Image (cartoon, rainbow, N blue to C red):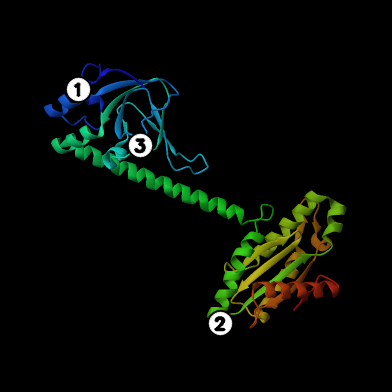
Amino acid sequence: METIGTFGASRYSIRDLQLFCESDEPAVLDALAGCEVVRVAKGSRVEDPFLARLYIVLSGALAVESDVPVGIHDGTVTLIHPGESVGEQAVLDESPNLSRISAVEDSELLVIEHELVWRLIDESVALPRALLRLLSFRVRAANALLRRRQRLGEFYRELSLNDPLTGLYNRAWLNEMLGKLVARACQDGRPLSLVMIDLDHFKKFNDTHGHLAGDSALCTAANVIRAALRPTDFAVRYGGEEMLVVLPETGGKVALSVAERLCRRVRAAVVFDDMRLPLPHITGSFGIATLAPGLDENTLLEAADAALYRAKQAGRDTISL
């Protein structure tokens, strides 16, 4: 930064300063007249790590980068235009300004030391009101940014818990949630059942029709399964052509009814709308397990997997308990 004069000797007026545009007290005018005006070249940093100062942009523009990195470009860089200020928080806290401040273009800045700002707050009527309005705006903007980050976080978290091909939940979701669902069922004394599904002879389907057609078949089966469930049920892509349905508050008899419905709908679904080839190339084997005393989420999964194995041994396209 290069000092080029004082505010009183510059071409700028107090009317150009948003914080002081309503201040016409002689004491304020006299105090600002002696403040430094500095020039900052484009791309240069405004650096004063051990000082609390208020900077007001007279010409050009500054970029203020938050001191809290978030790893994504989400609006944490704020542009400060002529008449606007930066450093109010540092002045009020009487602490160094930790934000990264740099000039977007050749800029001229009015520099006001924190002692003078506090003196003007005591002596001026208009400045405290202007500061309160500005800080209120900054708080609202910060809250909006936090809400946006939260929504982004929720969005990316949802992506991480969903299978990108089928849109069903994935193993990460299952690892996180099944234990909680089982614990809640045990605590409340409610039933819970699993239906494990394997699409029959899926490797042969892929070899015959190709992997793109196999992906279409997986998506078709996933959509059929999802559409046949209640809003309180969960469908998971367990791995490859295996899927899992989690049925809270569902005993074995109702789970069997659900599995029968899924079995029929998978068998009748159409994979290729243009060629009108129905799904008999891929049927499903279904294994059912219901939570019982002594079972946890791992043993419940093992029971469902064992039931699925029995369904395959029984000739596939069938259901086993």
Q: Which mark is residue 33?
A: 1
| Quadrant position of the N terminus in the picture | top left
- Residue 168: image location, x then y, percent: 65, 59
Gap in Å between the C-alphas at discs 3 and 2?
56 Å
Find disc 2 in the rendering and name its residue.
189
**Residue 143 is at least partly visible in this image:** yes
**Residue drawn 63% across and 72% down?**
247
Q: Are marks 2 and 1 in contact (CB under 8 Å)?
A: no
Count the labels in the image.
Answer: 3
Q: Nearer the viewer, residue 273 or 169?
A: 169
Q: Nearer the viewer, residue 23 or 94?
A: 94
Residue type at mark 3 is Asn
Q: Earlier in the sequence, mark 3 or mark 1?
A: 1
Q: Earlier in the sequence, mark 3 or mark 2?
A: 3
Residue type at mark 2 is Gly
**Residue drawn 68% across and 59% down?**
223
Find disc 3 in the rendering and name its residue.
97
- Residue 304: image location, x then y, percent: 72, 73
Judged from the image, the secondary structure of the residue bearing numbered disc 1 is: helix
Gap in Å between the C-alphas at discs 2 and 1?
77 Å
Residue type at mark 1 is Ala
